[in-house]
């Protein structure tokens, strides 16, 4: 009896150790009470639409953010990217990890060469919940391999359009003189992070971010309101009396309710919670920051971005 008990314990311990400190994404700590909310229209003012509305309205050609629901319906990722399955199927897939605070300060595109390359298995087991290292997988220039890409079918538009008609679109762009950074391509990047992680305020080309597991709290600030007023943007995103940039979670805790910030976001921005299966579209130039609520796995596509660009 004692030998059998020891064997059972060893098996449990072995399985747990292969998954890190938590057996599932959902088992990990989540700051739901502090950061989640119900997307009341007075707070989250952006349109919340279906996939069909997203495609029929060609919202990716517009200059307003939008939250699209049920995008992962039919995705194999919903089964293949549970924590146990992701580590079983794709343990050796290479990813880039770095501090979410540094990624926000440098910008996720410029940070590519500064990220530490590792495997999904090493990150999840040894780094994801390490309180000292604070590592976050967010490497937009490292394209996902075919297996992971197949799990994301059908791609959302307009990424699906390039995947299906890429060569024709490239030819059209070449003959029309269009620049490569004006095109949506079939480059998708994987992001994995724990509770309270997320990039601080930054801006880039138009992009969509789709949560497969977990949730994200977003603060977005209108590009037209920013205009050429760099002082306004700095005053909104930083504590001018303290040059050290706060993490996204601490910005909400310490700065959001101070001065004019909440007024600005409530009138010229959005404060929204994105849940699993939903895609948030961020137009070019909009300032935004993100806070993960629990372990979060997401997919990102950005207009003009190529693998290893």
Image (cartoon, helix red, strand yellow):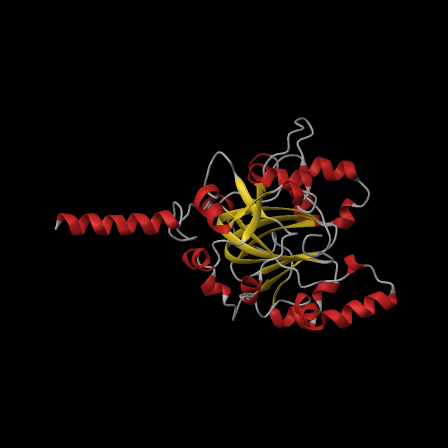
- Residue 110 lies, with reference to residue 93, above or below; the image says above
Classify residue 264 as left or right of residue 8.
right
Q: How many marks?
A: 0
Residue 256, percent from left and from top: 61, 39
- Out of 108 and 89, give the one closest to the viewer: 89
Residue furthest out toward the left: 1
- Out of 187 and 245, give the one closest to the viewer: 187
- Residue 71 lies, with reference to residue 97, above or below; the image says below
Q: Quadrant of residue 83?
A: bottom left
Tell me, yes or no, if residue 38 can be seen here: no
Residue furthest out toward the top: 241
Residue occupying image coordinates x 55% and y 55%: 298
Classify residue 120 as left or right of residue 181.
left
Residue 202, percent from left and from top: 68, 44
Residue occupying image coordinates x 79% and y 59%: 180
Residue furthest out toward the front: 92
Tell me, yes or no, if residue 278 can be seen here: yes
Residue occupying image coordinates x 65% and y 27%: 242
Classify residue 190 as left or right of residue 161.
left
Residue 104, percent from left and from top: 64, 41
Residue 71, percent from left and from top: 57, 66
């Amino acid at each position: 009896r004692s030998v059998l008990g020891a064997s059972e314990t060893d098996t449990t311990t072995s399985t747990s150790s292969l998954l890190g400190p938590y057996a599932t994404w959902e088992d990990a700590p989540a700051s739901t009470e502090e950061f989640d909310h119900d997307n009341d229209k007075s707070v989250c003012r952006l349109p919340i639409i279906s996939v069909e509305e997203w495609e029929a309205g060609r919202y990716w050609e517009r200059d307003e953010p939008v939250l699209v629901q049920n995008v992962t319906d039919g995705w194999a990722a919903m089964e293949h990217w549970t924590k146990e399955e992701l580590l079983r199927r794709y343990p050796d897939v290479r990813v880039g990890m770095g501090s979410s605070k540094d990624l926000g300060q440098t910008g996720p595109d410029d940070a590519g060469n500064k990220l530490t390359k590792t495997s999904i298995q090493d990150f999840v087991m040894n780094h994801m919940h390490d309180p000292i290292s604070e590592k976050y997988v967010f490497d937009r220039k490292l394209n996902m391999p075919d297996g992971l890409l197949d799990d994301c079918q059908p791609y959302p538009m307009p990424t699906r359009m390039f995947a299906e008609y890429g060569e024709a679109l490239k030819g059209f762009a070449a003959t029309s003189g269009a620049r490569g950074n004006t095109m949506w391509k079939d480059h998708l990047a994987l992001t994995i992070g724990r509770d309270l992680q997320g990039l601080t305020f930054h801006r880039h080309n138009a992009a969509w971010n789709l949560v497969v597991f977990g949730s994200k709290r977003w603060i977005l600030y209108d590009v037209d309101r920013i205009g050429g007023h760099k002082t306004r943007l700095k005053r909104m995103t930083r504590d001018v009396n303290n040059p050290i940039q706060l993490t996204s979670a601490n910005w909400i805790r310490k700065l959001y309710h101070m001065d004019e910030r909440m007024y600005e976001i409530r009138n010229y921005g959005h404060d929204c919670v994105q849940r699993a299966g939903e895609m948030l579209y961020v137009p070019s130039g909009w300032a935004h920051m993100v806070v993960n609520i629990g372990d979060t796995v997401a997919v990102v596509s950005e207009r003009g971005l190529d693998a290893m660009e």
